[in-house]
Amino acid sequence: MLEGSPCWEQHAMRPPVFFGSDRSAIASVLLWIVGGLLLCGAFAPAAAQVDIPDIQRLSASTQVGAGVQLLQKGRADKAISLLRSALSTDSVLVSPSHGAAAYWLGEAYSRAGRPGKAQSTWRRGLRALRAAGRFDVRLADAYLRTLTPGRLRGERLYAVDVYRSLLQRVGPDTTQAVRSIFRRRVAQVAPLMADSALAQVIEQDRSADVGLWAFRSGAGPALVEWWRGFDPYPATDENERLEEHLVRLVRARQVYGCQGRVSALDDRGIVQLRFGDPYKRRELNYENGKFFREVYRFGVNVPPSGFPESEIWLYTHIHESGFYLFAEEDTSDCFAIAEANELIPRYLTRMRPDNERGLNIAYSALMAMRAVYRELALYHINFSNRYSKIANYAGWQEMQATAAEMAERFGREPAASAGQQSVEVGAGVGQTRRVFSNSSLGFSFPTQFVTRMVTRARQEDRRAAERREKAMPRQHTTLLEGAAQLPVAVRTARFLGPDGTTRTEVYWGVPAARLPLTEDDSLASSLITFSAIRYDDTRQAVDRQQRRYRVKVESTDDPRMIVPSALTLRGATDPYHLGLQWGQYQLWPADSTSPRKLRLGPQRRMATARADSLQPLRANGPQVEMSDVKVLTLPDTSARTLANPMERASPYPFRTLSAGTPLLLSFELYHLTYGGDDRTRYTIAYEAEGETKRGWTRLFRGTDTQRTSTEMTMAGTDRRTQETILLDLSQIERDEPQDVRVTVRVTDEVTGATVSRSVDFVLQPRPTSN
């Protein structure tokens, strides 16, 4: 029972004033607590004289509660003494009511103006707690907030594990303080997530007020699973993409923090989290001497502070539409994504009448727009056309003003074409300007021009934002940028095992001519490593296999396709995912005396691939089930005439093929139904379709649509069988590469059930004869 309860309020108990050493402070607090407990009946005295318990006899949790009460009343220094005493009793103390004592001691140090001591307390406390197999959300969050880019380099893996563990615990039914932490952490990640992924975490729509987000049961595991799906290197135990995110988050919190946002980041920080550092970042600077003369004029009530600090960030290395304009908000020093109009005070861009005051303000607005757009046009073509129109109009106004001034100086009437009007605006020495309109030439007064340009800018900026939203990914990683890529082609095929589990065959290949690492034949030997990992539905690795292949290619004209034997992953019974990774390593001679003996050199190329959300094949009937179609090739066209061409066939993982490439399609059928004669009867049909400018069409022979198909009916005695079809695409006419989809469809004639599978190719055009 602590201060604030009805009993304490009734007896007007107040915390004591502290004097002297830490020990005397602790004793005073304990006397205060015990006195309150006695008055409220917590202890029933057995005699007239009551023994006061010493420090050791009072529970550590009670000390933590009292320390928190002192901290909430602003007595941080006194709370430190009590909380240190509690931790000295139990270094991993977690109060049932208040959580980790180490968090509160660090918070007390922070409020006492000792940030270094607070950070070290949080770090040590978290390590001790985790070593004991326990976790506290507030302590973990406090530790993460202590990270700097320099400190993160030294404890990267540990920090990522803490961050992952915190996300794992996101969910409902928490205290208000913990809910605030969860909302902040999810608000930092939500912009990176697709709507479908975020819907597994929060109950509301993305557009709802972040401060009111409620979390679904299982939100934490869904977040962790989502992050696993972005691991770029399946062969490693770490999730490098999550590490990259935490590095960005630490930097964004340090540079782009905004306490007024639930995410604690302004819009620059969120964009930093999504895409990393921009290709180019510029602070917009257009307020030179001419700007001050032409904009800040008598009668124009706009101060220099009316123009917000602004920046433009370019991500044109991701997509040409990837640019972000930021402006400082009026009510804080945080930056928000802005349109070009928001760089100019609303006072200037507001619609004005064509009177002297309105024209005076519009002239300043015109000059401000010219300066702003001149700066923006330097960085992105999206602003170039607007700047051109503004600059041409402003130049015409200045040219007319100069002509009128020269005529006045020499005592002549200014030459004026039909339809031209002028008005002198402003007051004071050097403050007056003459503005013009000319209906015959299509030039209006600045009031009308500024209004039109404001409207146009609003429309164009919104269209640009829509294009950007469609073109830019939710997030972008730089981990694979600059890495030499191994040109691997890969396919997967699922088959049903006798035990009812699904096995997945992964077959891959690479053109031999693309394998040499150097023109030096003595260094043409290399080692390719291949790792395949099967993940369960929550993206936990459940099967991992690795292979190593030594290859030696001494010519860039080698026509071979290097295709190792397929790698098989077994045992899937639930939805699963695959992660695949290849690395090509240089092999060096071990020494000059033994040129045939090689040692492993550096990795020179790599490749990764994923197959997400694979479904296991149906283990039982009653309807027919079908494996995926496995694509194979024959060594030459003569092998087509063999009685059993499968004996000489090898996997063909490549998408591109010529009409002369002899292909076999192999697949298995399961759960066929017996008819009245105890035999199975089924029909197999395959059809090739090509993609034209109008989309996917059947391949009928003609100018742009063609079709090739065949059908056969089979009978047998087994409910499970393997079938092979020879694929002949030589009759398809084409003069450019064409996407081709081959669909194999099986119909169980006994039940009428149908199942189909498809494979895609790119068919090369026929060589032209000269």
Image (cartoon, rainbow, N blue to C red):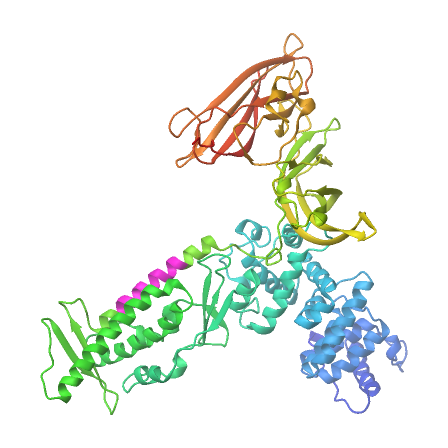
Q: How many tags in the picture?
A: 0
The spot of residue 633 in percent (x, y) is 62, 28
Q: Nearer the viewer, residue 226 or 560?
A: 560
Locate residue 17: give its quadrant.
bottom right
Q: Residue at x 81, y 69 (%)?
A: 93
Looking at the image, can residue 2 be seen? no
Q: Is residue 460 magenta?
A: yes
Task: Identify the main secondary structure in magenta.
Answer: helix
**The N terminus: image quadrant:** bottom right
In the rendered image, residue 22, in percent from the top left (x then y), is placed at 81, 86
Left/right of residue 425 with respect to residue 456 in the rendered view: left
Residue for point 84% across, 72% down: 59
Q: Is residue 627 left or right of residue 700?
A: right
* Front residue of 697 and 27: 697
Q: Is residue 760 left or right of residue 154?
A: left
Residue 127 shows in this picture: yes
Q: Is residue 572 magenta?
A: no
Question: Residue 184: image x %, image y %?
Answer: 60, 65
* Residue nearer the viewer, 595 or 517: 595
Q: Does 420 sit left or right of 471 as displayed?
A: left
Q: Is residue 91 above or below residue 751?
A: below
Query: Could you tell me which quadrant the C terminus lies in?
Result: top left
Q: Which residues are magenta?
A: 451-464
Residue 452 in the image: state x and y as whole percent: 26, 66
- Vertical comparison of 16 with 97: above or below: below
Residue most extreme to the top: 677
Q: Quadrant of residue 613?
A: top right
Q: Is residue 242 above or below residue 725?
A: below
Q: Nearer the viewer, residue 24 or 383?
A: 383
